[in-house]
Amino acid sequence: MPFCSQCGNPVGATETYCRQCGARQPVGPATSPSGADPLAGIPPRTASILCYVPGIGWIASIIVLASEKFRRDRTVRFHAFQGLYLFVAWLMEDWVLRPMFLMAPDLHIHGVIGALLLGMSVFMMVKAAHEEAYPLPLFGELAQRSVAEN
């Protein structure tokens, strides 16, 4: 099923206008220079979940933020921004905290923080699967600000 080129809501293959936002829909793949939209088959729920996959969710987040399909979908964009901020926290834990605590091997603070970040990612994948825009402490506020600025 195709999606609206403006708001991302499902539209019929033969519909000229979106029922949700009223935007005129492209006639077919000939209107797009690269053919069909590669994200056309990905529903917003799936795109939101992919933004939280540990290690590679940042790639999905960047694709979602750059895509035309999700440009007006505030919930998906919220998940993409929050997924990016969560990934930055992973990087800080890996590149900053882990080397700092190598000198004190008895303290497993970096391991606890890594487990906490993994738990947050899984928790947010579940929330995204239920189509909830749950703001995590600190990351959620930053994501809400980022969505509001666009």
Image (cartoon, rainbow, N blue to C red):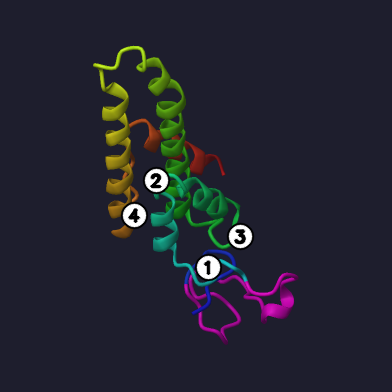
* Disc 1 crowd, CA 10 A, few/some/many (<14, 14-19, 20+): few
Q: Earlier in the sequence, mark 2 or mark 1?
A: 1
Residue 13 magenta: yes
Task: Please give the residue where the numbered disc 2 appears in the rendered image.
Answer: 54
Q: Is the residue under label 4 in contact with that under label 1 (CB below 8 Å)?
A: no
Q: Which residue is mark 1?
A: 21
Marks 2 and 4, the one that precedes in the sequence: 2
Measured Cα–Cα span from mark 3 to mark 1: 15 Å
In 3D space, how far apart are the residues under numbered discs 2 and 1 (Cα atoms)?
34 Å
Q: Which type of secondary structure does the marked residue at label 3 adopt?
A: loop
N-term mark: 3 or 1: 1
Pointer 4 residue: 128
Eye-nearest disc, 3 or 2: 2
Q: Which residues are magenta?
A: 10-36
Looking at the rendered structure, which numbered label has been put on residue 68? 3
The label nearer to you, 2 versus 4, is 2
Q: Can you tell which of label 3 and label 1 is closer to the viewer?
A: 3
Secondary element under disc 1, as helix, strand or loop, is loop
